[in-house]
């Protein structure tokens, strides 16, 4: 096929650019557009030869709209009433005015976008422009990556183009060819206040620790037994001469948030979504790793009740819990080994931009699906 000219909107740290390269589709990113100065510095560091426009979509050169764009909204849910969608609505308003429509469109957004009025406006515009389209909800677990990151995707091709699969007006759960039932990560972590140690015994004899239900525990065990998903150890920096002391959870965090942590081990086949607050906030921002696997996790939590803070800390410290490093999160998100951060980008900034990015492997597969 002819070489595609691609415009990368809301380019972030370049996840779409890397996905395009990984797809092996003949293409050139003619320009990237983003207003985030930190993300732009990282993008330019890794793609020094790509034109990067540090502007809002509205003031960027409209003639550079090429063959593909993506929309990446920061936040749990964006709607037409959200001021951050102004540039997105601008693109929708601009699209029908082109003499020649972009041949392909790929959009990625957070879960929740599928129920927004912004999404309704998108579908209405694409249909009026006679695009063939498909909406999907996909998580990396669908393709064997041990990280839950459920996202909304849309792929579209301009008339008279069509896809190699039968489209449906329904939002697909997973890829069209996926037989997995776990592509939408139906597992949810309970959010409640820490009201003391709770330790019970489930029907199968396992100890239920922290603030989990028996169903939560069973779900985790089911995920860890899913052999189509890789183990976390394939994505870790352990044993590579890295000093992990910097990433250990501090005592204050252990004592205050022990019951809320999602703890995984190197042989686990699961981890929860890493958000932009990882490393700064604890609850709901991502999993932590149990470095010392010689200690039974359930045993530690079962013995905490009634202990003093000093004794609790001694017990919890046996687990050697640590945060995932930015490089490890980048590995899980599919960024290649040659992707690096400039030296002046702090660890907190690295976590933040990664939490706002996308999974390269998922998008690469979608690009191939879209243009084939």
Image (cartoon, rainbow, N blue to C red):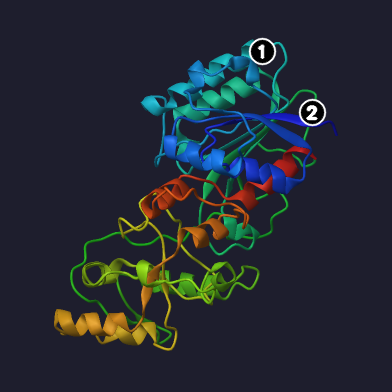
- What percent of the width, then of the height, locates residue 51? 61, 29
Quarter of the figure that contains the C terminus? top right
Q: Who's the residue at 40% across and 28% down the image?
A: 84
- What percent of the width, then of the height, locates residue 161? 79, 28
Q: Is residue 122 visible?
A: yes
Residue sitting nearer the eye, 257 or 317 = 317
Q: Seen in the image, is 179 located left or right of residue 289?
A: right
Dot 2 alpha-carbon crowd within 10 angstroms: few under 14, some 14 to 19, many 20 or more: few
Residue underneath mark 1: 98
Residue sitting nearer the eye, 45 or 155 = 45
- What percent of the width, then of the height, locates residue 77? 41, 38
Residue 216 vertical position relative to residue 92 in the rendered view, above or below = below
Say whether disc 2 or disc 1 marks the residue closer to the N-terminus: 1
User: In terms of secondary structure, where does tag 1 sit?
Assistant: loop
Residue underneath mark 2: 161
Quarter of the figure that contains the N terminus? top right
Residue sitting nearer the eye, 317 or 343 = 343
User: In terms of secondary structure, where does tag 2 sit?
Assistant: loop
Dividing the picture into quadrants, the one containing residue 75 is: top left
- Label ID, residue 141: none
């Amino acid at each position: 096929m002819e070489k595609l000219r691609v415009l990368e909107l809301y380019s972030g740290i370049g996840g779409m650019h890397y996905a395009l390269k990984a797809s092996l589709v003949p293409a050139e990113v003619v320009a990237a557009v983003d207003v985030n100065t930190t993300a732009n510095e990282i993008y330019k560091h890794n793609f020094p030869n790509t034109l990067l426009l540090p502007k809002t979509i509205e003031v960027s050169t409209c003639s550079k709209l090429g063959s593909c764009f993506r929309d990446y909204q920061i936040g749990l849910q964006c709607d037409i009433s959200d001021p951050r969608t102004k540039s997105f609505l601008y693109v929708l308003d601009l699209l029908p005015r082109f003499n020649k429509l972009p041949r392909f469109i790929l959009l990625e957004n957070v879960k929740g976008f599928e129920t927004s009025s912004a999404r309704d406006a998108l579908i209405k515009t694409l249909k009026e422009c006679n695009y063939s389209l498909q909406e999907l909800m996909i998580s990396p677990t669908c393709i064997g990556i041990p990280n839950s990151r459920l996202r909304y995707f849309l792929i579209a091709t301009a008339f008279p183009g069509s896809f190699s699969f039968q489209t449906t007006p329904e939002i697909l759960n997973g890829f069209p060819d996926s037989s997995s039932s776990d592509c939408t990560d139906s597992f949810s972590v309970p959010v409640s206040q820490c009201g003391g140690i709770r330790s019970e015994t489930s029907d199968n004899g396992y100890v239920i620790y922290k603030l989990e239900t028996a169903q939560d525990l069973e779900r985790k065990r089911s995920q860890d037994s899913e052999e189509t998903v890789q183990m976390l150890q394939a994505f870790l920096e352990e044993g590579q001469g890295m000093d992990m002391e910097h990433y250990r959870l501090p005592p204050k965090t252990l004592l205050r948030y022990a019951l809320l942590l999602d703890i995984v081990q190197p042989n686990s086949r699961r981890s929860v979504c890493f958000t932009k607050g990882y490393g700064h906030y604890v609850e709901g921002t991502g999993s932590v790793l149990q470095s010392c696997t010689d200690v039974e996790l359930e045993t530690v939590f079962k013995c905490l009740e009634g202990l003093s803070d000093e004794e609790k800390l001694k017990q919890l410290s046996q687990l050697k819990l640590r945060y995932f490093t930015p490089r490890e999160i980048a590995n899980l998100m599919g960024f290649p080994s040659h992707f690096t951060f400039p030296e002046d980008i702090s660890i907190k900034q690295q976590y933040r931009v990664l939490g706002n990015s996308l999974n390269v492997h998922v998008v690469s597969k979608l690009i191939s699906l879209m243009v084939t």
